[in-house]
Amino acid sequence: MKETILAKFAEVFGDGEGAATYFAPGRVNLIGEHTDYNGGHVFPCALTIGTYGAARKRQDRKLRFFSMNFEKLGVIESSLDDLVPSREAGWTNYPKGVMWAFGERGMEIPFGMDLLLNGNIPNGSGLSSSASLEVLTGFILRDFFGFEVSNQDLALIGQFSENNFNKVNCGIMDQFAIAMGKKDHAIFLDTADLSFEYAPIKLENAKIVIACSNKKRGLGDSKYNERRSECETALAELQKVVKINTLGDLDEETFEKYKDAIGSDVRRKRAKHAVYENQRTIQAVSALKNNDVKRFGELMNASHVSLRDDYEVTGIELDTLVEEAWKVEGVIGSRMTGAGFGGCTVSIVRDDAIDAFIEQVGRAYEAKIGYAADFYVVEIGDGPCRI
Ligand code: GLA
């Protein structure tokens, strides 16, 4: 990959002199969905697929971007003096947003750059190609200009830029999982205070399989913000009767005791998901510590049911993938992952069942939905690096 992007860099930008190469992973969340903006726990991991970049510092303030994933767009030019979001800027709004966010944090970027990208995260799949690009950009800026920021800061800067520059109200999970990724480990993160612990994922005779629905998220973003505000309203209603800072402060019992303070059935279901999903995540991590992968899988399945029935962020594509997966002998657990409405499912599948899984789920999905799903047997990788 390094040779490929360096060769393309030289072709696109005239010469490859002085270009350095970098990588930032994508991520998959194993359990703990729609909990990160509710002060709950998440359990994601970085993947070995992600975004590759070749970059070179310039002597002026110009920015030149090129993506091998969107070759038709050609070179997109901008400048450090024009760090404002625009529709025409397309995908370059992500790296520009991060440059802007560094400036907001008092770290002015002195010189522009030429940046070429090539990602192998399937587009629009919900495996966080945008957060990957944000962390990659932050990593390059730190490498070029020596800013004193930790990987955790890179995650926070990425989220800040996505919230305030790209106006997507995401939580911290994606950027954190990517910036802090560790090979063969998932990250048990408490989003209330960003304390975290790495948990080894030792799946004996099983692998993580991602099924991509190929249904692009679209309406998803507005629904995402709607779920957030439903949870915020439910929290405000609960705070009138119980002293909590976030929905993540509640266990199931306390929630059941006070839930009638929430003034609508819909909001009660949303809050229930946030509370129960957080508790499931905590239980799932302790099951894993006890080597009880079967229990971990059951909790993944319960997570999907809650996302389908209470949080209502699945849809026929994701439900079909998961419900068909549950029918396959050798599937330990299966659920939607990420924001939902489209994107991917994550399953833990015994090695000897992987072929049958891909065949059976793939066939049933295509028959019902009318187009094919894609399957990826993935590995858990490290965070961003220079390559
Ligand atoms: C998206 C957001 C994350 C998180 C998930 C749902 O991936 O970017 O912050 O909220 O959805 O768990």
Image (cartoon, rainbow, N blue to C red):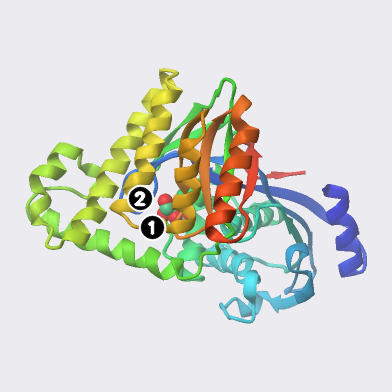
Which residue is rendered at x = 75% and y = 75% of the image?
Answer: 73
Measured as percent of width and height from the top left, residue 106 is found at 52, 63
x 35%, y 50%: residue: 307
Residue 253: quadrant of the picture:
top left
Please determine whether, in this image, residue 18 is positioned above or below residue 222: above
Q: Nearer the viewer, residue 106 or 355?
A: 355
Q: Is residue 56 left or right of residue 184?
A: right
Residue located 47% across and 45% down the image? 322
Q: Nearer the viewer, residue 169 or 284?
A: 284
Please give the residue where the numbered disc 2 appears in the rendered image. 307
Tell me where residue 267 sits by quadrant.
Answer: bottom left
Residue lying furthest top: 290
Choose the circle earlier in sequence order: 1 or 2: 2
Please state which of residues 163 and 111 is positioned toward the viewer in this rendering: 163
Q: Is residue 158 left or right of residue 77?
A: left
Image location of residue 31, percent across then percent down: 42, 40
Q: Number of marks in the image?
A: 2
Q: Amino acid at mark 1?
A: Val
Up-down relation of residue 184 to residue 222 (above or below): above
Kind of residue indicated by mark 2: Leu
Residue 313 — which label? 1
